[in-house]
Image (cartoon, rainbow, N blue to C red):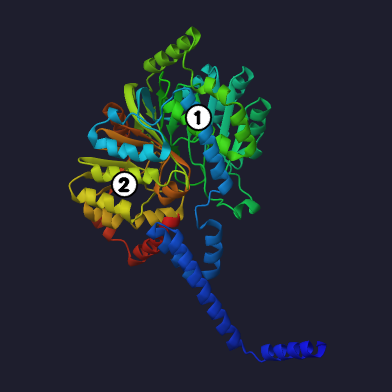
């Protein structure tokens, strides 16, 4: 028996030894073809977006080893099964609490005209948030105004402060916000901050982080990364939300990270970042602020089992903090003071980067709005679907402000079609952005847009980071969402749909002020570029769904 095994082994070794390099190459080619076919079938079966599928297949066949490893790591929007389970459990806890307290979040479509009820239902179906009336809102267009209002509200907080940011960069006026939070925690206000682990990587190693925790502020990492975690979920799925909720009636939303633009990314040669925020105030039991609070509390609870257990144990405490149904006289006095303060406050004429004049923005009463949060594998592509739908319904004008413009075929087609049917379509985009690939991917779409009659305004006053969409005179999307596939499909985002013409007009006026610092791109000028430049842009465009 032993002799037979030895003879077989020797025969196998002799057979292998007789192979030539051509034989090994042939075997490698067969394995390569099999692997390519298997991976292509996997991409086609999993990816629902055709552009994303084509981009991955192109990478896979162009750079096989890199493409295989890249797809295994970041190819599919895996946010993690455990995270999704905790999201579902946190939502269930809060929904049960809301039902017990008779708080209804998913109604209000009857407040809208028939024209907008359908698009509103897209958000309600996936997020559970309907349309909320009776808000006082103010558009804050300058960092000085945003910091001033935010610090004043933190100093006036009595019960709770909830914050959720992608980036905290503790320089300049951000230091004043941190000191205000520390003071609030010392006087007994419950403070929670949820911060993206990657976007604020340096913050978690800073002295300010330790100061906040030492003062009793709860600092949570959102979607922490690690080598082991990468095997089970994508590390590039990020929490891109910017939300602040103070007590139960004041909320902030917008493109504004907790950074001072005078200090942030000044080595990128793109100028200061220019952001906007909306401050919303409501005395209603259910409002934009309480919806924001529900989002932040759900996100905190979903981060780990300890947070989820704490949420479950303290749900009654959160009920009292977030939804005060019968406020005391002192509570009412504090609210009235806050409301009067905002009515009396007007943002002065300000000068931004490169002398951009920002108009004064007064308070608007009676605003009707809807909060639309999105997350991969949780709310589908709710913001993308909302945007495409509303573009097709536009009758007079579409004006979009975005720092990163990398649409897919359906979205760019919707804009081209709108321009061809006579809608005034304007894109306000920074002339220079802080991403080389995004810059060229964006430029690949200019030709067809210009040919259709779309106005492309290249902003020259810095990196215009505001994300706003104005449709006609009575609809606006305002929040954290860039016009790219990362925002629509991969990041956790949040946007505010506004249905009140007076508030929409404020956002439109702000966009108009940006246009004064823009260079308008002409079709003839764009066609004069060299063939090499066009080719390079179009090659980058192939990979645009992945940027």
The correct choice, above or below, for 444 with respect to 211 in the image is below
In the image, taking residue 249 as reference, residue 449 lies left or right, namely: left
Q: Is residue 112 visible?
A: yes
Q: Position of residue 301 (x, y in %)?
A: 57, 35
Q: Can you name the residue that lies furthest to the right here?
A: 2
What is the quadrant of the C terminus in the image?
bottom left
Q: Position of residue 511 (x, y in %)?
A: 31, 36
- Identify residue for label 2: 388
**Are the residues at dot 2 and dot 1 in contact (C-beta closer than 8 Å)?**
no
Q: Is residue 59 visible?
A: no
Nearest-to-viewer mark from 2 and 1: 1
Task: For mark 2, give the secondary structure.
Answer: helix
The answer to which of 62 and 430 lies nearer the viewer is 62
What is the quadrant of the N terminus in the image?
bottom right
Q: Quadrant of residue 29?
A: bottom right
Q: CA distance from mark 2 to mark 1?
A: 33 Å
Residue at 57% x, 52% y is: 233
Q: Can you name the residue that lies furthest to the left here?
A: 422
Q: Position of residue 89 (x, y in %)?
A: 55, 37
The answer to which of 357 and 15 lies nearer the viewer is 15
The correct choice, above or below, for 263 with respect to 198 in the image is above
Q: Position of residue 219 (x, y in %)?
A: 61, 33
> Label 1 neighbourhood size at 10 Å, few (<14), some (14-19), many (20+)?
some
What is the number of the mark on residue 96? 1
Residue at 55% x, 52% y is: 234
Q: Quadrant of residue 211?
A: top right
Q: Can you name the residue that lies furthest to the front here?
A: 1
């Amino acid at each position: 028996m032993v002799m037979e095994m030895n003879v077989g082994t020797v025969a196998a070794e002799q057979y292998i030894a007789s192979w030539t390099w051509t034989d090994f190459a042939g075997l490698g080619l067969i394995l390569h073809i099999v692997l390519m076919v298997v991976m292509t079938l996997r991409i086609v079966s999993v990816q629902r977006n055709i552009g994303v599928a084509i981009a991955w297949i192109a990478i896979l066949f162009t750079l096989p080893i890199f493409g295989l490893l890249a797809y295994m790591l970041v190819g599919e929007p895996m946010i993690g099964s455990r995270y999704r389970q905790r999201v579902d459990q946190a939502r269930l806890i809060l929904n049960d609490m809301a039902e017990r307290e008779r708080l209804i979040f998913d109604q209000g479509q009857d407040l809208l005209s028939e024209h907008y009820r359908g698009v509103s239902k897209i958000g309600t179906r996936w997020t559970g948030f309907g349309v909320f009336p009776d808000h006082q809102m103010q558009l804050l267009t300058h960092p000085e105004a945003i910091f001033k209002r935010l610090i004043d509200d933190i100093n006036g907080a009595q019960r709770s402060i909830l914050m959720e940011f992608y980036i905290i960069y503790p320089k300049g006026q951000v230091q004043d916000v941190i000191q205000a939070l520390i003071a609030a925690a010392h006087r007994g206000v419950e403070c929670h901050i949820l911060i993206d682990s990657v976007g604020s990587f340096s913050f978690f190693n800073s002295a300010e982080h330790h100061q906040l925790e030492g003062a009793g502020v709860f600092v949570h990492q959102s979607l922490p990364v690690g080598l082991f975690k990468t095997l089970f979920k994508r590390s590039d799925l990020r929490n891109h939300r910017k939300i602040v909720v103070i007590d139960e009636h004041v909320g902030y939303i917008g493109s504004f990270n907790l950074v001072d633009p005078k200090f942030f990314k000044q080595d990128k040669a793109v100028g200061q970042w220019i952001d906007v925020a909306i401050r919303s105030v409501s005395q209603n039991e259910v409002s934009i602020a309480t919806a924001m609070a529900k989002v932040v509390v759900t996100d905190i609870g979903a981060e780990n089992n300890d947070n989820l257990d704490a949420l479950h144990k303290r749900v009654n405490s959160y009920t009292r903090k977030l939804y005060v149904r019968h406020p005391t006289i002192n509570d009412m006095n504090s609210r009235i003071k806050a409301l009067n303060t905002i009515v009396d406050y007007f943002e002065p004429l300000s000068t931004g980067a490169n002398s951009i004049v920002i108009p004064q923005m007064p308070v608007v009463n009676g605003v009707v709005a809807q909060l639309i949060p999105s997350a991969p594998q949780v709310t589908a592509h709710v913001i993308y679907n909302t945007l495409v739908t509303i573009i097709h319904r536009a009758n007079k004008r579409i004006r979009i402000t975005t720092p990163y413009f990398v649409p897919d075929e359906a979205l760019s087609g919707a804009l081209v079609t709108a321009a061809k049917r006579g809608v005034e379509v304007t894109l306000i985009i920074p002339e220079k952005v802080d991403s080389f690939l995004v810059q060229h991917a964006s430029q690949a779409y200019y030709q067809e847009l210009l040919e259709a009659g779309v106005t492309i305004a290249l902003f020259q006053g810095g990196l215009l980071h505001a994300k706003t969409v104005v449709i006609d005179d009575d609809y606006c999307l305002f929040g954290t969402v860039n016009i790219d596939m990362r925002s629509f499909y991969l990041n956790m985002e949040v946007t505010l749909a506004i249905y009140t013409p007076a508030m929409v007009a404020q956002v439109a006026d702000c966009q108009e002020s940006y246009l004064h610092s823009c260079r308008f791109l002409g079709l003839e000028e764009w066609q004069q570029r060299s063939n090499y430049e066009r080719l390079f842009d179009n090659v980058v465009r192939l990979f645009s769904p992945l940027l």
